[in-house]
């Protein structure tokens, strides 16, 4: 009996295998009917418009001087000028200056006012003259005396002028040691 069941089982498996392997995929049928569209949801309510922020200051300009120049013990300063440069502009702006030296792979911008190196210091200042106004970039030895070091090639020089949008009179009697009074005066109260 056990043999009959085993043979019967093998026969069923063989028939199933032949049936399955003989099947082919038929052609796709026609598409079914389209379903109906769902209903649209309700629109949300618009939020309240926020208050406009304070206008920023876009009056920042960078003056680039890309012509290299050499400074040495016999040529210790370089003057710069540009259209619109005057005492009023300087008095109402933040003015910063930077330079790049001519070193291989040196893309560092050095501050043009202060100890820029271990062997010299640089000075950057505004000169108000009746004929013309200009900025002067000058080298000095670390002790403040005339520059006596080796030649330095300045590859690029830039002057950043950020015109103030508000000028606050610093002479007004405010006790700057009182934090709350200072914040109130400057309009920075939380």
Image (cartoon, rainbow, N blue to C red):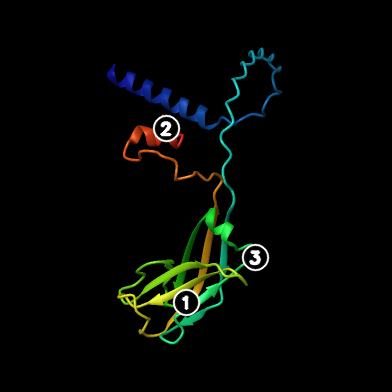
Residue bearing mark 2: 184
Circle 1 packing at 10 Å, graded few (<14), some (14-19), many (20+), is some
Mark 2 or mark 3: whose residue is earlier in sequence: 3
If the image is split into quadrants, where does the C terminus sit? top left
Picture disc at residue 154: 1
Q: Are marks 2 and 1 in contact (CB under 8 Å)?
A: no
* Front disc: 2 or 1: 2
Residue at figure coordinates x 53%, y 74% from the top left: 79
Residue at figure coordinates x 64%, y 16% from the top left: 43
Say above or below: 173 vs 85. above
Circle 2 packing at 10 Å, graded few (<14), some (14-19), many (20+), is few
Q: Position of residue 62 (x, y in %)?
A: 56, 61
Viewer-proximal residue among 27 and 53: 53
* Front disc: 2 or 3: 2
Whole-number angstrom distance, CA of label 2 to CA of label 1: 45 Å
Q: Position of residue 69 (x, y in %)?
A: 51, 80
Q: Are marks 3 and 1 in contact (CB under 8 Å)?
A: no
**Left of 65 or right of it: where is 38?**
right
Mark 3 or mark 1: whose residue is earlier in sequence: 3
Residue at figure coordinates x 42%, y 31% from the top left: 189
Residue at figure coordinates x 68%, y 15% from the top left: 37
Q: Position of residue 7 (x, y in %)?
A: 36, 23
Mark 2 or mark 1: whose residue is earlier in sequence: 1
Q: Are marks 2 and 3 in contact (CB under 8 Å)?
A: no
Picture disc at residue 72: none
Say above or below: 21 vs 115. above
Residue bearing mark 3: 83
Label 3: element kind:
loop
Q: Residue placed farthest to the left in the image?
A: 2
If the image is split into quadrants, where does the N terminus sit? top left
Circle 3 packing at 10 Å, graded few (<14), some (14-19), many (20+), is few
Q: Position of residue 20 (x, y in %)?
A: 51, 28
């Amino acid at each position: 009996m056990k043999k009959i069941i085993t043979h019967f089982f093998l026969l069923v498996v063989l028939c199933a295998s032949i049936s399955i392997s003989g099947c082919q995929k038929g052609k796709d049928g026609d598409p079914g009917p389209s379903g109906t569209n769902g209903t649209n949801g309700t629109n949300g309510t618009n939020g309240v418009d926020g208050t406009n922020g304070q206008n920023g200051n876009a009056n920042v300009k960078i003056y680039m001087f890309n012509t290299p120049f050499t400074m040495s013990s016999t040529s210790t300063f370089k003057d710069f000028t540009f259209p619109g440069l005057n005492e009023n502009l300087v008095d109402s702006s933040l003015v910063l200056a930077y330079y790049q030296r001519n070193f291989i792979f040196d893309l560092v911008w050095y501050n043009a006012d202060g100890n820029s190196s271990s062997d010299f210091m640089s000075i950057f200042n505004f000169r108000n003259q009746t004929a013309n106004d200009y900025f002067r970039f000058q080298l000095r030895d670390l002790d403040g005396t005339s520059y006596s070091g080796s030649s330095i090639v300045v590859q690029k020089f830039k002057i950043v002028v950020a015109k103030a949008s508000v000028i606050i009179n610093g002479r007004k009697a405010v006790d700057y040691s009182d934090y709350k009074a200072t914040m109130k005066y400057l309009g920075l109260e939380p």
